Amino acid sequence: MGDVIKRRILNISLPVTLYEDLEAMAREKAKTKAEFAREAITRYIESEKRWQYIRKWGQASARQLQLKDENDIEEIIHTMRKEGRND
């Protein structure tokens, strides 16, 4: 037999307007509400993971460059623009 996909059931309560939007959008995309919700949740989680990676990278870069706050970043940008650098 093929691989068995393990699943868990999630019951959620939605405000009426959000439910109606979900229903309309799922119908428009020719998907079930469950498929649409699953895809939306997956995209949200992937987006959060990417932003988490970007934040960690930014924090590490700030430490490496010894930046204390946003003013330090503004100063670097100002200096680079003044020198005509785009790197």
Image (cartoon, rainbow, N blue to C red):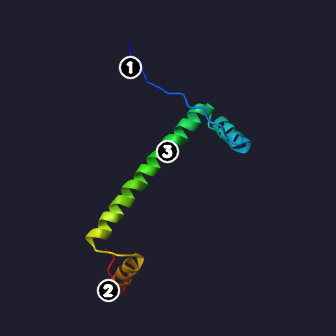
Of callouts 3 and 2, the N-terminal one? 3
The outermost residue toward the bottom is 82
Q: Residue sitting at 33 percent across and 61 percent down? A: 57
Q: What residue type is labelled 2?
A: Glu
Location of residue 61 by image quarter: bottom left
Residue under the image location 46 percent in, 50 percent down: 47
Q: Which label sits in the foreground, 2 or 1?
A: 1
Residue under the image location 41 percent in, 49 percent down: 49
> Mark 2 touching mark 1, by CB under 8 A?
no
Tag 3 residue: 43
Front in this rendered view, residue 50 or 32: 50
Which percent across, then down, holds residue 48? 45, 51
Mark 1, other Cα within 10 Å: few <14 / some 14–19 / many ≥20: few
Q: How far apart are marks 1 and 3 (CA)?
A: 24 Å
Q: Report the residue marked by disc 1.
A: 3
Question: Local crowd at mark 3 within 10 Å, few (<14), some, or many (≥20)?
Answer: few
Tell me the quadrant of the picture where the C terminus can be found. bottom left
Q: Position of residue 58 (x, y in %)?
A: 35, 64
Indicate whether 51 appears above or below 5: below
The disc placed on residue 59 is: none
The amino acid sitting under disc 1 is Asp
**Which amino acid, by three-letter code, is at mark 3?**
Arg
Of label 2 and label 1, which has the lower sequence position? 1
**Does residue 31 show up?**
no
> Please, what secondary structure does the residue beneath circle 2 have?
helix
Q: Name the residue under label 2.
A: 83
